[in-house]
Each structure stands twice: as structure tokens, then as C-alpha cells.
Amino acid sequence: MTGGVSPSRPAVFALAGRGARGPGARLDDELLTRALALRTDAADALGTLVPAERGREFAPQAMSELAGRCVQQVRALPDPAGAQAELLCLLALDLHQVALELSQHELGARTRRLADCSDGLARLRALPSSADLLDVVCEELVQRCGFGRAVLSRVEGGFWKPSTAYFSDDDESWFSGWVDQGIALDRQTPETRLLTERRPAVIYDTESTTVHRPIIVESGHSTSYVVAPLMHDDVVVGFLHADHHPSSRRADAVDRDVLWAFAEGFSRIYERAVLMERVRAQRDHMGLILSSALGMMNELCDPDSSAAVEVMPDLTARETDVLRLMVAGATNRAIAERLVIAEDTVKSHVKHILRKLGVANRSQAIARAAATAPR
Amino acid sequence: MSPATARSWQLDVGVRQRRLAAELRSLATAVPLDPGSAGAIALAETIRRWDSPRSGNSSMAEVCALLDEAGATQAIVAQRVLETPLRVARRINEALTRIRRATSFADILRTAPMELCASCGFDRVLISQVDRSTWLPVGWHVAADADSPANAAFREYVRDARISLANGMIEAEIVRRRAPALVRDARAEPRTFAPLRDLARSSAYLVAPIVASGGVVGLLHADTYTSGRALAEADRVHLRAFADGLGLIIERTVLLDRLSSQRERISRAFATAEHLVNDLCAAPVQLNRTTAVVAVAPARADSRPDDGLTPRERDVIALLASGATNAEIADRLTVSETTVKSHVKHILRKLRAANRAEAIARYLGLARQRRAS
């Protein structure tokens, strides 16, 4: 290996330009300045400039439309080979150039959003339990995938029930009233269609679409949003809603697809967490069943010791269990293991037993228990 | 129009035209456009035309035609190029959904390389298993031209290759970092595994780790050998999304397997237990040696329990069982507390008890046995 730093390491592990993140990534200053200058030039040359849709002035399409208008103008000129025609043609070529560069930027932004989505999913995958996943999924979606708000809902028996949310502007007060409120999936809303179509939807304008107005418009003040299904074995078990609130930016097809990728990945991660918990639960249940079966057999083999404490007054069922094991000679640790509780809990049970039996120590408790045993 | 301005106008148009071509080329290579698709063909055609220098003077009509074509190209870029990253993401998720339906591990290994080729626009994909400090190729897919000499040699090599994850190798770094890598120039990259690179004749390739059950269990290698398409950042992002999803699917299969084998073991254990118990219940009572053992206890019930305790020790344990402390016992028996402690020690040993409580339990049990007989 030669020393020193090679000018360019061919292998790349990280995405370039991590500083610019998400859809809010600022356009390159130089590119923006050129685009702005060209718009001004075009306005001068064309005489008028039809204003582009707000927020879309610097979209590649807006730039190439301007170029198209320049060409129209050239064709309409009385002298289509004059200096004015040349000027317009060069301007149109420059506009196309800037449009392509803006497209390149947009392409980078979209790829980055996908990469960020993978990052978010990787962080979720590191969480230990399904409950933790539900707690942070909305936050991860907002922080990583370029949304302003996100809501996770369950789908149960013809209703969807908002469950958790994360809002970037912190004004979550309205949401708590909606938690676990069943919203009927009956009308022709995007959510209802999701159940059968099983693919995400983008709602460009909540005013002109049939939506669940009470939660989405009246409480949530959402003007435009995307929603994706959470699937398990071809069944929709939940929804992820996201929008750009408080920004006035409208949701678009890119948002829908980013949310889609996130929702699919999340469904897989959630299923894995549930399966892991199921494996553990199965083991724990079997342990309990076997130990209680063994305990019952022990009692049957040695009926006196089990009968010994059943007549003790005032003891709770758990304390009776503990006393029974004490009489059998078990240590606190052994009792803890047998009853699957903490040793400290056993100690506190023992303390209560001593007090209730009115004895000073363990030996007296055992003696007392044995003395009350039926002869 | 003066010759000077005419020349500069021609020059300006030429410069802009080539700049457009360069920009379009970098856009078209930044994403995995489907080779052979209408969009890809139209773009390649446009790039080729815009790249060739214009002969002599362009008429205004020609420049206008160029501008019309630029407008049409913008539409293709908007529809085909810009849509590609998310369209590929969608295809990846559809592919993963299909792979998830695979019922066995072998099925997953068989279908994954094929699905990866199809969804992300790669020509060759190799899937390997990572086993401690080695990686073993276990499956591959070649989208086109499978029988070319390079592909045949490659297949032959990976059939039973076992490659060490040597320090400083890209694959070793991927396993350590758990991040995918894009090798843009394989020949200039000292960390590639040279034998495989030379056989496969990859000029650029991608590698991603497959993470499952808390560790790297496999690797995915991908390249664009046949089409010669340049690999871009977007490809790395796509491969990562696929590998992450595949890891989860593998882990799911492992977990489902574990659940069902647990279930099987439990029911086997219960079946065995039930079998044993049924046998015992159905067994006739016979006065042979095995049942005689049970009969021994009542036979010797009238004798003293064989606890081996001395009379003094029996006094001590009786008091102990009544709940007396060492001090109280010492008081009652008028011996020193040290003596009591020593008695207790002997009692514990003789009754094989770990502590006082157990000794008392033993003693009370024996006493009860005596009473019962």
C-alpha cells in the first residue's frame, strides 16, 4: 500500500452532499441565480411573463415552457433571421440548459430522499420491541423523509383509529382528542379506497376531494396529504398519513412514493419485531405451564406440605405460594426462580407473611405453618 | 448580417448544443433507465445528434428544430428520468413482496438475484453467504448473454469458491461497516478481490451487506456488464433498499422456522409425556421388584427415622422447628450459643440441608412420616 491520500477513492460508501437533505434541500445558489436572471431576460424578450404556479417558478418544466414561448415568438417574427430572432433562440437554448440542470438537481433530491428513507428504516430496525416501533415511527418519518407531520392509525373492523403522531411544529394538542376514535371507512374517501387498492394515494387538494373532513380539514387543517397502507399478509392493518404542514407546500407524487417505500419497509420491520416477540412469548408460556404442572405434581406427591398452608388465614394467594415453598425449604432465590418474580419481591412477600403470622423469623413461620397443618 | 456576427452566432449555438448534450448524458447515466425502452432510445439518439458538430451555417429553421427537439427531450426527462428513482423503489418493493412468498431459504436464494436484476436494472447479480471470515457465492443470475466466455468462466469459478474476508478487502469493510459500496473503477481499486474481478471482467460494481439476526449473513454483488451502463449513486441507494428488505425477509423465514420447530418440539414433548403417563396408568400392579421398592417404606415405618441424628441434635432441631433462635436454644439447653451453632452445622450436614429452613422442612417431613405410620 502506498502512503498518502489518493486524489479520489474509487469505492464510495456514503452518499455525496449529505449537507443538503430532503426535499427542502436548497438549490445551488449559482444555479438559482442563473435561473432567476434567465426568467428576467425572458420576461424582457417576451414582453409579458405568465406567472408560474407559486413554488413552481424554478421547476424544470416552467423553464422549458418559457423556452417554448421564445420559439413561438421567433416563428411569429416578421424577420425570422434577424438579431431579435437570434437573441430569442440563444435565450431558449440557455433556458433548456438550466431546465436540464434543475432536473439533475431534482433527480439528486429524489435519490437522497430514498436514501434517507433507508436510513430511517435502519434506525427503526435497531429498536428492540414492537411497542417502541409504534412510538417512534412517526417521528422517524418526519425527521428523515421530509414531511411536516405524520400520523399512524390502526385499521379495525371497518374503522380507522388514529394512534400515534409526530408534528414538527409541536402543536399536537388537537390530536390527543382523536386518539383511538373510530372513523368509519364507509364513504368514497381515499382511506376507504386504500383498503381494496392497497396502494398509497396523494390528495392534492382536500377542498376538492371527498375526505374525512372532521379530522383532516377541521382539526388537522391539512390542505394536501399522502396516505399509505400498512400491510400484513395482503391485509391492510394500518395507515400512515403525512403532509407538509405548517409549510404551505402541497403533497405530490414523489411524497406518495417516498411514503410508500417507507410504509413497505416499516411493515416488514414491524412483522419481524412481532415474530421475535412471539418466539420469546412461546418459550415463556411453556416455561410457566411446565413449572405449574410440576408444582401441582409435587403437591400431589407430598400432599401434607401443600395442605399445610391452605388453612393459614389472611394470606394472599401469592403469599400462600411463597409460604408453601418456604415450608419446603426453598431459599428466597429458589422461590424467586420458581414463581418467576424478583428476589426483592419474594423478600417483601416473606416480610408480609412474618407480620401476618405474628412471628419473628423464617423458622418460626415454617414451624407455625407446619403446626397448623391438619394432622 | 455581417460575417463576424454570423460566425459568433453559429459558434454560440454550437457551444450551447454540446452543453445540452453533456447535461443530458449525465442525467441519463444517473439513473438505471431500462435499456431498450422508448425513453432510453430517444435520449441516446438526441445525445448522439447534439454531440456531433453542426456543419457550416445553421439556418434559423434548423435552430428552431433543435429547440423543438430540446422541448420534447425535456418532456422525456420529466417523464422517464425524474420518475426513475421512485419507480425503481416501487419495483424493489414489489420484488420483495414476491420473494417474501418463498417458502424456503433455498427459494429465497434462488429468486433474489433474478428479482434484483429485474427491479434495479443490473445485468449480473451474485448472492453470497458470509460465514465468519469467509464468503461463499451461493447463487447468481445473469440477465443476458449468459453463455459468453466471461460469464461461463465466472460461473465456473464461483461454483465452489470460498473467499477469505481478508483485511483491507472491500467485502471485509462492508461486513464491518454494514453499508453498501460503489466501486466505480474496479481495475484501479486495490481493495477488490482481483481473481473474481478479472474473471468477471467487471469494470464497476456494487456490493451490499445482507443483515439478519443482528449480523451480516450475506453479500449482494451487482454490475452492468452486458449493457455497459455506468453505475451511479442511485444504484447504490437502490441496492441498499433491496438488501435491507431481503435481510428482513431472511430473518422472517428464520423466525417462522423457529416458531414452528418450537411448536413441534413442544407437542413432541407432550406426546411423550402423555404416552408415559398412559403407560403408567394402564400398568397392572404386580408384586415384583419394582413395586416392592414402594412397599419398603411402610415396612420399616415402626423403626425410627434413619436421620442419623444424636439425641442432643434431635433436641436442637426440635427447638429450631418451633421457631427458636440460637440464643433461645442455648438458654433452654443450657449450653453456649457456639455449641448450638456447632450442633446446627452437624444437623445441616446429616439432613443434607443447605440452610436452616430446609433442615426444618426435612425434619418436619420425617416427623410427619413417623406420625402417619
Image (tube, coloured by chain):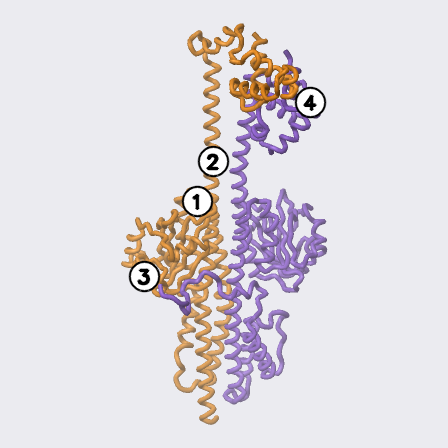
Residue closest to the eye, A191 or B293: B293
Mark 2, residue position: B260
Mark 1, residue position: B102
Q: Which mark is residue B201?
A: 3
Q: Residues under labels 4 and 1: Cα distance?
A: 65 Å
Q: Are marks 4 and 2 on the same chain?
A: no
Marks 3, 1: nearer the viewer: 3
Which image quarter is the C terminus of chain B in?
top right
Kindly state the secondary structure of the residue where label 2 is placed. helix
Identify the amino acid type marked 4: Val
Q: State yes or no: discs 4 and 1 in contact (Cβ < 8 Å).
A: no
Q: Is residue A277 visible?
A: yes
Depicted A201 relative to depicted A302: above or below: below
Q: Name the residue at 40% across, 74% down.
A: B48
Relative image position of residue B203 (x, y in whole percent):
35, 63
Identify the amino acid type marked 2: Ser
**What's the colour of chain B in the image?**
orange
Depicted A322 relative to depicted A251: above or below: above
Tell which subunit mark 1 falls on: B
Identify the amino acid type marked 3: Arg
Mark 4, residue position: A359
Tell which subunit mark 2 falls on: B
Q: Earlier in the sequence, mark 3 or mark 1?
A: 1
